């Protein structure tokens, strides 16, 4: 500990919770060096967070595996021996201003101070602007306290502290840079937060709404505020209500363009919570499995063995690209083996996909993932394929008996086309989705070995075929078995890659093929719109929702159609945000 000069005010200890905060931690600690006791409670970061934090003389590190915010914070208060009677809590993406620093030192050292904790406000920054309106400011939170006078309520996320004693208010602010690490971490974090909020909501919704209304009149600290939060879990159309509240009622419109985007982002977050509540209260996994079973039921006797030439060489090889597909792979391999030998091209899965695939009868080769197109092209060039034909199957897809028989018949014909487009039907929320622009969904998946390869595109890649193409008559099945959280995480990754493609196109660097080389007739025109026109289209999220749900009659798919249209609108919104962020960063780099 540093020696304080005679009469110098005694500082508070500082508690910073971290997990992979190398971008923020140095700047955060620099604003806290007035403390002689800075404790970094780290959840086993894998980046340079600890290395950078320990450069400062008054920093000590404590590590603990994160479970929930309340348990993690309460553990710190109960187990860390702070050197000073007061503690200031800070997140790594926050900065204490000189004015707030001086106010803290003055108040906690004042002889007349009778408070046990203090609330303060913060300025949330987005796109270089302070979000002053929209209900984002002022938000009062407790950050300065005596550690023995405070505990956090038992809640998975957004846990609030409960103070035993007197609560005061600080006039200073800290600055919150919640987007310092970019948009992807924000999407990822709020996907996780929405899961925890949904878990809490399900618990709350099992109680009486009248009980919560009664608690609104409570004089006990924090009870009315928590009751109001709990009542929000009974509210339908959370996303729309939150947007109207933030943007219009709380004048978020005065925050300019940043205010509009932020209100939409929070609205999307609220929608994710609502959808995950629905997922937990209206279990649809079994109905999904029932629909898949119906589509895969054999219409007649057991199928014949996979076809082969006179010398025993198989006619068809099946390639399944995978990464962490343990939930699907055994069934996928068993289904695909009806066509011929199965080759699993794995990107070093960590969930046991490889062993499950081998046990199911597939050959497995691992190759480091670069992009979807490069991975598949590597497989087509390097896997031990022997058949005249190749079928590409994703792990969450299945071949129906009718399609299997059709592909075998095509492979045995004398003069078929070089490649075949195969239609697929999505099974989501226990329903076959037949509208909303998701059906028919044509993909070139069956082709003569050596005659086709994928265009150089990181996501939503299509196949180039050197020869005539045709269309298969029967379906494969696309099973959306994953949780909503997993679905959103996948779309965050896709939005990141799609926005990169848009950036390349804006700089004339795109590697994708011209749509006319990928499809024929109307499909080629649609792909041209998707790649050339769509990135320039305003209000993409709204247009996508209206197109899917109204124009393409997604309304006829019931709840599944409603939520797919909203999820795809979220995807378009995230892609546009990431594209705008990346082009802005690129322009700044060029100016530099």
Image: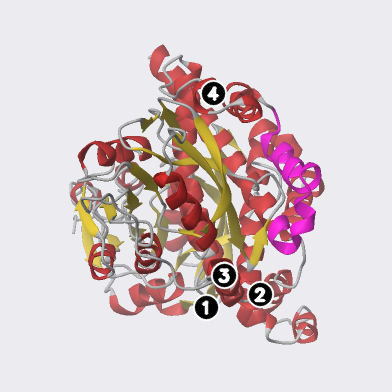
Q: Calculate the distance from the C-alpha at mark 2 to the C-alpha at mark 1.
A: 10 Å
Residue 540 on the magenta segment: yes
Give the quarter of the image for residue 493: top left
Q: Say if mark 2 contacts mark 1, CB within 8 Å.
A: yes
Residue under label 1? 153
Q: Say if mark 3 contacts mark 4, CB within 8 Å.
A: no
Give the image location of residue 67, x and y in percent.
Answer: 38, 73
Colour style of the rendered protein structure: secondary structure
Dot 2 or dot 3, earlier in sequence: 2
In this view, 506 is above or below 562: above
- Front residue of 36 and 217: 217
Number of other residues with Cα within 10 Å of mark 4, as a class: few under 14, some 14 to 19, many 20 or more: many
Quadrant in which the C terminus is drawn: top left
Residue under label 2? 226
Residue under label 3? 299
- Front residue of 444 and 575: 444
Q: Calculate the distance from the C-alpha at mark 1 to the C-alpha at mark 3.
A: 57 Å
Give the image location of residue 465, x and y in percent.
Answer: 42, 28
Q: Is residue 103 visible?
A: no
In this view, 398 is above or below 512: below
């Amino acid at each position: 500990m540093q020696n304080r000069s005679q009469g110098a005010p005694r500082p508070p200890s500082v508690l910073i919770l971290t997990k992979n905060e190398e971008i923020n931690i140095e700047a955060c600690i620099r604003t806290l060096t007035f403390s002689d006791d800075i404790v970094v409670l780290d959840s086993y970061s894998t980046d340079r967070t600890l290395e950078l934090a320990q450069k400062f003389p008054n920093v000590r590190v404590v590590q603990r595996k994160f479970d929930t915010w309340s348990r993690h914070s309460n553990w710190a208060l109960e187990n860390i021996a702070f050197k000073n009677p007061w503690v200031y809590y800070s997140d790594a993406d926050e900065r204490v201003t000189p004015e707030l620093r001086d106010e803290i030192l003055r108040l906690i050292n004042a002889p007349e101070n009778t408070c046990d904790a203090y609330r303060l406000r913060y300025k949330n920054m987005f796109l270089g602007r302070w979000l002053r309106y929209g209900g984002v400011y002022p938000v009062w939170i407790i950050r300065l306290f005596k550690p023995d006078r405070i505990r956090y309520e038992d809640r998975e996320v957004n846990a609030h502290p409960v103070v035993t004693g007197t609560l005061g208010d600080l006039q200073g602010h800290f600055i919150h840079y919640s987007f310092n690490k970019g948009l992807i971490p924000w999407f990822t974090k709020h996907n996780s937060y929405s899961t925890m909020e949904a878990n809490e909501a399900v618990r709350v919704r099992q109680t009486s709404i009248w009980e919560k209304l009664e608690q609104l009149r409570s004089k006990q600290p924090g009870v009315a505020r928590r009751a109001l939060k709990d009542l929000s879990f009974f509210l339908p159309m959370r996303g729309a209500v939150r947007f109207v509240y933030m943007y219009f009622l709380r004048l978020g419109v005065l925050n300019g363009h940043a205010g509009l985007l932020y209100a939409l982002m929070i609205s999307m977050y609220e929608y994710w919570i609502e959808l995950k509540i629905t997922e937990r209260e209206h279990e649809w996994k079994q109905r999904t499995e029932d629909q898949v079973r119906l589509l895969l039921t054999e219409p007649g006797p057991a199928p014949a063995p996979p076809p082969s030439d006179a010398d025993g060489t198989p006619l068809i090889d099946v390639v399944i690209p995978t990464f962490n597909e343990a939930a699907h792979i055994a069934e996928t391999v068993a289904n695909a083996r009806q066509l011929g030998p199965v080759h699993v091209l794995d990107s070093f899965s960590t969930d046991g996909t490889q062993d499950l695939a081998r046990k199911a009868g597939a050959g497995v080769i691992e190759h480091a993932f670069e992009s979807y197109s490069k991975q598949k092209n590597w497989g087509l060039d390097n896997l031990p394929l022997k058949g005249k034909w190749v079928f590409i199957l994703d792990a969450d897809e299945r071949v129906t008996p009718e399609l299997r028989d059709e592909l075998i018949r095509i492979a045995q014909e004398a003069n078929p086309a070089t490649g075949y487009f195969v239609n697929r039907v999505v099974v989501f929320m226990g329903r076959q989705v037949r509208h909303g622009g998701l059906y028919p969904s044509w993909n070139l998946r069956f082709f003569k070995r050596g005659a086709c390869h994928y265009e150089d595109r990181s996501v939503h890649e299509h196949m180039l075929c050197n020869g005539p193409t045709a269309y298969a008559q029967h379906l494969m099945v696309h099973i959306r078995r994953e949780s909503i959280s997993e679905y959103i995480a996948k779309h965050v990754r896709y939005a990141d890659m799609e926005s990169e493609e848009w950036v390349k196109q804006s700089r004339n660097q795109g590697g994708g093929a011209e749509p006319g080389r990928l499809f024929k007739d109307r499909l080629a025109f649609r792909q041209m719109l998707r790649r050339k026109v769509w990135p320039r289209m305003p209000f993409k999220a709204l247009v996508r929702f209206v197109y899917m749900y109204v124009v393409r009659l997604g309304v006829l798919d019931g709840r599944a159609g409603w939520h797919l249209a909203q999820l795809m609108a979220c995807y378009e919104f995230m892609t546009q945000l990431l594209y705008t962020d990346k082009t802005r960063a690129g322009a700044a780099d060029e100016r530099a």
